[in-house]
Image: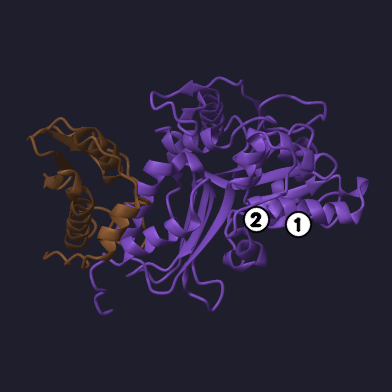
Amino acid sequence: MCTLCGGVEQARHWTDRLEGTASSEAEEPAAWRQGRQLQIALANRILSQHGLAVRDWDAHTFVLSNRTGQSELVSRLAAVWSTAERLGRCRCDPLNPVLLSRLEGEEGVEEAAT
Amino acid sequence: MIPVHLITGFLGSGKTTLLQRALASPVFANTAVVVNEFGEVALDHLLLQRVDADTVVLQTGCVCCTLRSDLAAALRELFDKRERGRVPPFDHLVLETTGLADPAPILFTLTADPVLRHHFRLGSVVTTIDAVNGAQHLVQHLESIKQVAVADRMVLTKTDLVDRARVEGLRAEVARYNPTAPFFETPDASLALDRLFSAETFDPADCDSPSVRRARAPLSGTVGGGDGLDRHARDITAVSLTVDSPLDWTVFGMWLTMLLHAHGDDVLRVKGILQVRGVLTPVVIHGIHHLVHPPTSLPRWPTADHRSRLVLIVRSLPAHLIERSLRAFLRLAPPERDAA
């Protein structure tokens, strides 16, 4: 457990664990931060249509907010979708043709500066 | 990490007979065995442990997120005895499930338990299918279809009791639910037990097999009746996807977590070999329902084809939308940096 914020250290998620890549901040800080910024940029692309925004908090937690300012902390990306559905009263479905049409018409995400 | 191989299959399909044969082989000299029940076929093995069917259903109510507390306790106890030197230092574990057991909670238990996940990993899932009654089980029992869908290896048993045409018909039928798992047959004196329970459960060539290509079309007209199970079974489809350029791992992870969040109940199996940006070796990924194993790397590409190949066995999900969705997500990745 983190002695400052009280957060419980989470076990690694499968999306974090890939041999040969930076899987933690300690192993390769720049690449790890870049991957995290990409996660946030992508999540915002997907969730913006529901009035939701994701931002980083302390480099280990995501903050998910809706238009009314209601926010929730999310420890890992895989949990963002269920929290987003609750905050945005929406359904996060990657097979939704409306979402796909929108994504197909957009440019790729810019690489984050490190 | 000790691989936990799973033997699953319908009631009377020959699971214990296969296990008995495996344990007689020198390949399984250092193997512990965990069974749900002591059946009619006696198992005389030094490292044999029984588990009771206690389960804890988590708040999600999801089928796969069911903690098999009995299994967790049995494996912890076995590992503890191994560490204390009270049992031989086994390096494999074989778990025989009951005929109606769903394999997904077993995978969940191995990945979610805070102790077990550091010492055990899922090995291969071997499903036995009875050549005499297997076709009927597929018609009548959804569990039988799920056991076939999650298999890494399939063993057709009792093939000496029916004619060859019937065996071939059953193979074709089973391959429609799981086109990637290779077949073995018993009785077959040359049955390659080491291959059957090999830790490497992914053969990329299987993704290109004719049965995978056939299975991209929805199944139809293969099982009789018109009841709910028939409709359910016919909606199971294997979707095979190939991506030519290296994948961005972050984008792929986001796509798959979102897909499994929304449709994990209907994704019976995910398996793939991936070419990932910045990673020289192929990455192998496996999943059942909402659960994905920690990905592993192969030391080298098995063939000259280095494209990413992903197979999803899904229920009632349109293949064209899955493919469109993956490609829409992948094009969001930032441009690939030149290799240093």
Image coords of residue A97 (percent x, y): 34, 54
Indicate left or right for B28 with B146 as reference.
right
User: What subunit carries mark 2?
Assistant: B
Query: Amino acid type of disc 1?
Result: Ala
- Going 57% across and 30% down the picture, which residue do you hit? B78
The secondary element bearing badge 1 is classed as loop
Crowding near pointer 2: few (<14 within 10 Å), some, many (20+)? many
Where is A20 relative to B263, above or below? below
Measured Cα–Cα span from mark 2 to mark 1: 15 Å
- On the image, numbered disc 1 is attached to which residue? B192
- Going 43% across and 74% down the picture, which residue do you hit? B244
- Going 16% across and 40% down the picture, which residue do you hit? A64
Query: Amino acid type of disc 2?
Result: Ala
Q: Which picture quadrant has residue B164?
A: bottom right
Indicate left or right for B160 with B339 as reference.
right
Image coords of residue B301 (percent x, y): 51, 72
Q: Find residue B259 and name its label.
A: none
Image coords of residue B249 (percent x, y): 33, 61
Q: Which comes before the other along the chain, label 2 or label 1? A: 2
Indicate left or right for B117 with B40 as reference.
left
A103, B185: nearer the viewer: A103
Colour in which chain A is drawn: brown
Q: Which picture quadrant has residue A72?
A: top left
Crowding near pointer 1: few (<14 within 10 Å), some, many (20+)? few
- Going 43% across and 32% down the picture, which residue do you hit? B113
- On the image, numbered disc 2 is attached to which residue? B181
